[in-house]
Image (cartoon, helix red, strand yellow):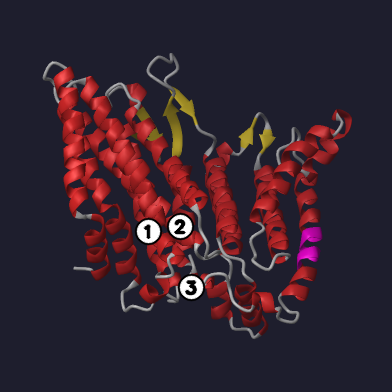
Amino acid sequence: MNPEFRRLLLTEFQGYRLIALPVSLGAIFGLTYYLNDFAFDSGSSFVATAGYFALVFIWGTRQAADSVLQEINHKTWVPQRMSSMSAWGMGWAKLAGSTAFTWIGGFICLGVFAASNTEWWSTQRLIMSVALYAGTGLLAQTICFLVSLSAIQKRREFGRVHVVSYQFLGMICALPPLYIGLSVTGGEGILDLITWHGEYLSLPQFMAIFTAAFIGWGLAGIWALMRAELQEPVGPWLWAAFVVFAMVFFGGLRSLPVGPNTPIAFYDFPSIPTMVLIAGVFLIYLICVTEGKNRIQLRRLDGAISGRQWRTAWMTMPRSIITVPLVGLGVWIAASNFSDYTVLRGQDLHLIYGATILFALRDLGFIYFICLGRRDGRGEGIALIALALLYILVPETIGVETLDQVIPLFSPYGENPSWWTVIAPMLEIGIIGALLARRWRRVIRGPVDAGDSSPPATGNATEQT
């Protein structure tokens, strides 16, 4: 047995817990059974669902998010990193071992939930519902653990606020597919169907595919980040593959049912190229905000480029920089193959697509400019606030008579797109690029400051995916 998994099981499955959990759940469900006239019905189903959420989505996500963070806070993580365990062995052991006890209670609750709905639901619907509950619970815990591993690439001190924020991120990724998958009339009517890559799938089926796919990618991300933490090389291919997958996955969404009481059965998503653009641009901002930007990492990149060590430069290149051309290529391919979807209300969307990617590149440079001004490289929050003000408040203060002329400086989405829609962000990229190059020469190529003699994470943050 995996030694780390065994250690966590011995820690979590202590004597009093093994007694307290089944006794507590048995008392709760027994009382519910008694109050419901000795029957399992909607009341016991509600209690079982609430218990499952408390155990798996609240307690379990906290355990997952805190599994490595508490090791860092207690100064016991470095000896574990020095062990001979592989990145995959350490990753799955931490995730499964820290949450195993919560799953014992979770499966008990799911059993009561199934017993409470056996008489009223079809077997297919019951199995799919239980699978969605279990799958989204695992997805939430996987995302929490993944986010915490990403966070330790940038900092080494964590408090309760950090753990709660990682829990929140995990739950907001998992609860929507659970809610949408279960908000159906039975999984068999036309109002429960979604169109995805030309296929009609029921909402539970699609959400099951979504959950399984992103659990797999989450586990792959855990493996890659754990390799980075154990100072093992990881290339950019995994992240690039995920970007391609996300654009293809979300680009296939065409229609979604509005609800069982709506006369119009389907709500159309934006066009295929637009969905590809939305998914890709979101990932540009996501990886830019989450990946490390310490000066040691960037000096290594600068040295590799100066020395024409292209393989090293490719391996140390920030993933956000790699993502921009990848998204641009994906949008171009989608727009070329689905040209019928690139016109909206008589307007050609190609210019808007190009301007959106250029704005993302501008914002990427701005975020790096802010982060390079701090020794710890953590200025993403300030940069995002400034960008939000730029996108929201500035256009509102501009007079209506000049709005059409200046809106391309602040947003790619104007009423009448023209070449100025693309030229405006290109000019801004030139300005940001000049400022960033000046700061790069001063901070990265200048004398090494004693305050940034080592990266904030002891793992190899440059090799994260």
Q: Residue at x 79, y 33 (%)?
A: 396
**Kind of residue at disc 1:** Ser
Magenta span includes 435: yes
| Picture mark count | 3
Q: Quadrant of residue 81?
A: bottom left
Q: What amino acid type should be assigned to the residue bearing mark 2?
A: Ser
The disc at residue 148 is 2
Does the stretch in magenta take in 106? Answer: no
Quadrant for the N terminus, please: bottom left
Q: Is residue 319 above or below residue 21?
A: below
Residue underneath mark 1: 67
State whether the magenta stretch is mostly helix, strand or loop: helix
In terms of secondary structure, where does tag 3 sit? loop
Q: Picture coordinates of residue 131 (x, y %)?
A: 25, 39
Viewer-closest of 294 and 12: 12
Seen at 21% across and 55% down, the residue is 14
Q: Magenta segment range? A: 430-436
Q: Which residue is mark 3?
A: 459
Q: Residues within 10 Å of mark 1 (few under 14, many from 20)?
A: many
**Residue 434 in the image: x percent, y percent?**
80, 65
Dot 1 or dot 2: first in sequence order is: 1
| Relative to 160, 379 lies left or right | right
Q: Secondary structure at mark 1?
A: helix
Residue 278, percent from left and from top: 56, 44
Nearer to the camera, 7 or 364: 7
Amino acid bearing label 3: Gly
Q: Is residue 264 above or below residue 221?
A: above
Question: Mark 1 or mark 3, which is nearer the start of the sequence?
Answer: 1
For the residues bearing labels 1 and 2, Cβ distance under 8 angstroms: yes
Calculate the distance from the C-alpha at mark 2 to the C-alpha at mark 3: 14 Å
